[in-house]
Image: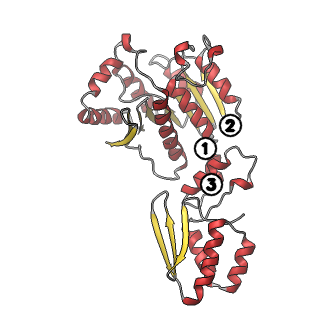
Amino acid sequence: MEYMFKYDVYGKVENKEIKILELIPIKRRYVIKLKDDEVSSAKQLIDLLNHGTTLQELEKLFAKKETMNNIFVFLKKQYLLANYFGDNHPDDPFARQIEMLDSFNRSSVSTSKLQSDLSQKSVLIIGAGGVGTALSNLLNSCGIGHIFIVDADIIENTNLSRQFLYNRDDVGKPKVEVLSQKLNKRGLGKVTGINAMLTLSNYKDILKDVGNVDLITGMPFPFSSSLNKLYKDILTLGYTMYAIGEHDAGPLFTKSNEIDKVANSIIAKYPATNFLNQRRDNPARHDRHPSFLPEIQITSSLAAAEIVKYFTQITTMNTENAMYSLHSDNYTVSLVKF
């Protein structure tokens, strides 16, 4: 198979018109008017592209009706035809993902290169708890080349129901040690554990060890006052950060002054956020909070998808200047814009 409509592109011939419906990355319709003597050939062309075809089959059709070649060229220029077929790459663990990327790709860059670009990216995840395990698993599955995970905790029995990559035999072991070992066995990308807590006193040393990572993530927002200065200092060094919590994903931060700006916007919309921050600043409550794996998986999946968008630019991020917010009462997600 060499040519076919992308996954969410559909074509048909009706009333002497070729009608094309494109669903992603944005919904668009194309209508191509046909002459009476072009309808039959157009039906053949659209049928071939709906089901998959070869260049040889297309050339036979073009020989009969030259205008079909012009229509074919138009469809290619609009990036409506797939340029990657997973069935042609049975040994590639990312084959189905590349097909998904291809369905979004509306550029001249090959989709295989987009996946290759992901393998060159590095991410530092702060924390190997519920969010950290879910997010590291997802980003590793997406093909991020090198993931660093920083956490000083050991695995406890209370972690097992939420931090799904750990089991009873792991209790008492450092989280980052177990997590990195299990993910590295998959062979999808490199994972390095750093057995430490990221603080104002050691963050420069840790960042020096990991090098110029492309993104830092894993921290819930709004930040507690104790973490505000830490993350502002990191942003001042030129890093990019993406916030994620158990009930929210986003936004993206590139400058330190964005933290207070976004925090003030959230507090203005949701005054109860002040009480949440007071709880986060209370050491007695630091490790005591409700946590539910299905919620963690939802927000982590949203964050991972946004991070892939950020790296590949296949489509615009929804949370570059916004936040996904998960409503626990009915499990709907809203987009809070700043």
Q: Residue at the location (44% across, 23% down)?
A: 291
- Mark earlier in primary sequence (1, 3): 3
Amino acid tagged 2: Leu
Graded by Cα atoms within 10 Å as few (under 14), some (14 to 19) or many (20 or more), the crowding at tag 3 reads many
Q: Residue at x 41, y 15 (%)?
A: 288
Q: Amino acid at mark 1?
A: Leu
Tell me residue 216's x, y (percent). 50, 32
What residue is shown with label 2?
Answer: 188
For the point 55% across and 13% down, the residue is 157
Say whether marks 2 and 3 touch (CB < 8 Å): no
Other residues around mark 2 within 10 Å, as few (<14) / some (14–19) / many (≥20): some
What secondary structure is found at the residue carrying circle 1? Answer: helix
Q: Measured from the top left, where is residue 170 in percent x and y?
A: 63, 15
- Checking the image for residue 118, the label placed there is 1
Quarter occupied by the C terminus: top left
Residue matched to label 3: 111
Q: Tell me the quarter of the image containing the N terminus.
A: bottom right
Q: Is residue 329 above or below residue 50?
A: above
